[in-house]
Amino acid sequence: MKELLLIPGPTPVSEEVLDALSNETISHTSDRFVKILSNCLNNVKIIFGAKNSTPFIIAGSGTLGMEMALTNILDDNDNLLVISHGFFGDRFVELGNALGVKVDVLKSNAGETVCLEEISKKLKEKQYSAVTITHVDTSTGVLADVKKITEVVKKNSPDTLIVLDGVCATGGVKEKMDEWGIDVIFTGSQKAMATPPGLTMLAFSNRAIEKRKILKKTRTYYGDILRWIPVVEDPHKYFATPAVNMVFALEKSLENIMEFGLKNYFEKHELLSRKIRNAMELFGFELLSKNSPAPTLSVFKYPVGISDIDFRRLLEKRRVVVAPALGELKGHYFRMGHMGSLTEEELFVALKRIMEVLEKMGLRFDKGKILKTFVES
Ligand code: PMP
């Protein structure tokens, strides 16, 4: 049996996409490659809802996307407000500190969201150059209400630039960059984009590009959008060599998503998350982010008596890989990704393997009811 990679990224990559990756490498400035990169840039714009913004595809992981977002819009003493729903929200605090900007953070309890009143209050206290939102925090499975947060930012501080980390969301959850007034959005190739890790895709609004142009200091060379803009406008131009084969793979995966239909793709994520959660609940697992659950991953609390290490080890023996929880949640919860190219059939197989493991670990449950719940949810 093929290993089922149900960690929250990287996610399973289809044979077709892997085949595309192994195509013969071609010149990065050839007409053939220009066409492929242009296709990808167009599809990235569609997925981000970024018709009026400038897209980029750069070799590097999601963290490069985070870094490019901040280095291109913040000067040394600019104020940054971070809205954090977990580990990846907190990463913006570390990044802001590393860049020497002034960082304030609004943090929620694990599994909960920062309330809109708190954001509104903070924005009235100080002028922030930028605010960051993590669409889905992969440590807690919390989905931020991005539309509502952007409305609060626009109302209280219209000049504040809005940065959205879509790494664990883009493709699995609707994003409307232009409509919601997002200034920088980025994602990684390895999650709902169903491509191997290695690329970050971003888009910058005109307002964000204008801010880059007036920065006093250039904090990045490779990640400087002003060096990449000529390339995305005409990919015959060279700045730094693109990851040619990774772009082949991305093109194939984006083509598959577009053929499937973006709306259907969002709905598939909703459906799979509902099915697995309803079934897992019957074993006694509890979802961490009950009030704002993300459709891309679930963070489940173990029923009493089930050891994290043993559960994941026994599951891995049956070729289903899930991830440990992060930070204070480690040992008590585990994380399961259900995004990208994953199918209902594959998730059903995973559920059956989980059932075998839990049975072996001594848990009692009604098998028929659990399988039926999955099928009928
Ligand atoms: N943001 C979020 C929400 C993430 O889930 C991750 C990776 N899990 C990152 C940023 C960082 O991405 P990468 O590991 O690709 O650098």
Image (cartoon, rainbow, N blue to C red):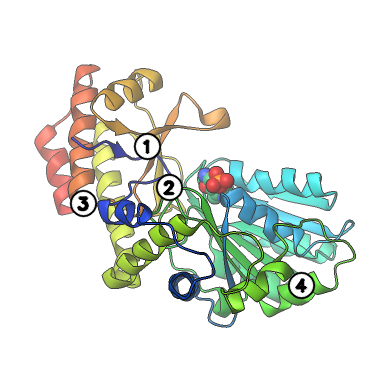
Task: Tell me which residue sits at (80%, 61%) in the image.
Answer: 74
Element type at mark 3 = helix
Task: Tell me which residue sits at (34%, 26%) in the image.
Answer: 303
Report the amino acid beneath label 2.
Answer: Lys
Element type at mark 1 = strand
Task: Tell me which residue sits at (79%, 44%) in the image.
Answer: 98
Of circles 1 and 3, the one toward us is: 3
The label on residue 286 is 1
Quadrant in the picture for residue 350: top left
Q: Are marks 2 and 1 in contact (CB under 8 Å)?
A: yes
Q: Is residue 124 visible?
A: yes
Of circles 3 and 2, the one toward us is: 3
Q: Nearest the camera: 280 or 313?
A: 313
Of circles 1 and 4, the one toward us is: 4
Element type at mark 2 = loop
Q: Are marks 3 and 4 in contact (CB under 8 Å)?
A: no
Q: Is residue 99 left or right of residue 183?
A: right
How far is the residue under mark 3 from the one under mark 4?
43 Å
Label 3 belongs to which residue?
A: 344
Of circles 4 and 2, the one toward us is: 4
Q: Is residue 91 left or right of residue 317?
A: right
Tally of marks: 4
Q: Is residue 203 left or right of residue 99?
A: left
How far is the residue under mark 1 from the one under mark 4?
38 Å
Of label 1 and label 4, which has the lower sequence position? 4
- Image spot of residue 115 (x, y percent): 62, 56
Task: Tell me which residue sits at (21%, 51%) in the image.
Answer: 344
Label 4 belongs to which residue?
A: 157
**Mark 4 crowd level (few <14, some 14–19, many ≥20, 10 Å Cα):** some
**Mark 2 crowd level (few <14, some 14–19, many ≥20, 10 Å Cα):** some
Label 2 belongs to which residue?
A: 290
Report the amino acid beneath label 3.
Answer: Glu
